[in-house]
Image (cartoon, helix red, strand yellow):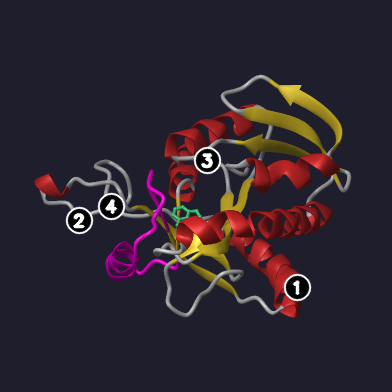
Amino acid sequence: MGAMEDEVRLIRADLEEIEELDGPCELLRGRLEGTPVVLAKCGIGKVNAALAASAMVQAGATSIVFTGVAGAVASELGIGDVVVGNKFSQHDADDTAFGNPIGIIPGEPPFWEPNPDLSAAVLDALRELEEPRGHQVVAGPIVSGDQFIAQAEKVAWLRATFGASAVEMEGAALAQAASHLGVPFAVVRILSDSADGDAVADFPAFLNDAAHRGRDLAHALAKQAPRT
Ligand code: ADE
């Protein structure tokens, strides 16, 4: 799954035996490295990610990997580094009026965790691809909300409140949906900006680089997946 055209276009270009499916977003079935895959371009935001997760499972997906870009939150990470989510929260969920901490949705767990085996496989593949290129690859908390963050004060708040490594707009919604659907998931985010005053300029300048790196990861994962 990706949210934007640049997050999926090169993966789509490499798909074979493409079949277009009806769904709430662009949804394709095909083969990558001989492995059957479903590719979804979900669109931006939490609701779109949740809808796409459901549609992908209906289309036969047995695990879901999101690849895309995010803003850096951890101070030791910078543009080009890669975060694989190990904990997901929705920073814009607010039930504090009823005494819950910020980020909690009543009836939902305090945060979501990805499938450990899938995340470990994704981390291994990324380390092989990205470390020789000079990029850090880390496992860390990802926070999501229906907000593009472009303010240093908000970044400091996300770091202090959630211990976040990266901020984006879909991962925690995929996490919530995948946990309800019972499907393993992982989220990979290549850092396109620092979610500060420069983010609006940095973000579009980085998308082409992210597109190539997302494609490389998709190929590496498809090569090791069961070929049924
Ligand atoms: N995706 C990439 N950069 C982002 C940011 N700064 N805020 C939210 N989502 C993003």
Mark 3 or mark 2: name the one nearer the start of the chain.
Answer: 2
Q: Left or right of 155: which side holds 64?
A: right
Distance from disc 3 to disc 4, alpha carbons, whole Å, reads: 22 Å
Q: Position of residue 142 (x, y in %)?
A: 45, 60
Asked if the residues shown at circle 4 and circle 2 are in contact, with their CB atoms under 8 angstroms apart, the answer is: yes
Q: Which amino acid, by three-letter code, is at mark 4?
A: Gly
The answer to whether residue 86 is seen in the rendering is no
Q: What secondary structure is marked by label 4?
A: loop
Q: Position of residue 62 (x, y in %)?
A: 66, 40
| Amino acid at pointer 3 | Gly
Where is mark 3, residue-wise?
A: 182
Q: Is residue 18 left or right of residue 66?
A: right
10 relative position to 33: left or right: left
Give the mark, 4 or 1, whose residue is nearer the N terminus.
4
Residue drawn 47% across and 55% down? 200
Would you place residue 167 above or below residue 130 in this image? above
Kind of residue indicated by mark 1: Glu
Q: Residues within 10 Å of mark 1 (few under 14, many from 20)?
A: few
Give the magenta-colored segment's residue range: 143-165
Disc 3 versus disc 2: nearer the observer: 2
Disc 2 designates what residue?
101
Do the residues bearing badges 1 and 2 touch, measured as CB atoms within 8 Å?
no
Residue named by callout 1: 128
How far, Cα to Cα, is label 4 from label 2? 6 Å
- Is the distance from the Cβ of mark 4 to the nearest ligand 1 atom less than 8 Å? no
**174 up-or-down from 129: above or below:** above
Q: Residue furthest top?
A: 22
Mark 3 touches mark 1? (CB < 8 Å): no
Q: Amino acid at mark 2?
A: Pro
Which disc is residue 103 wearing? 4
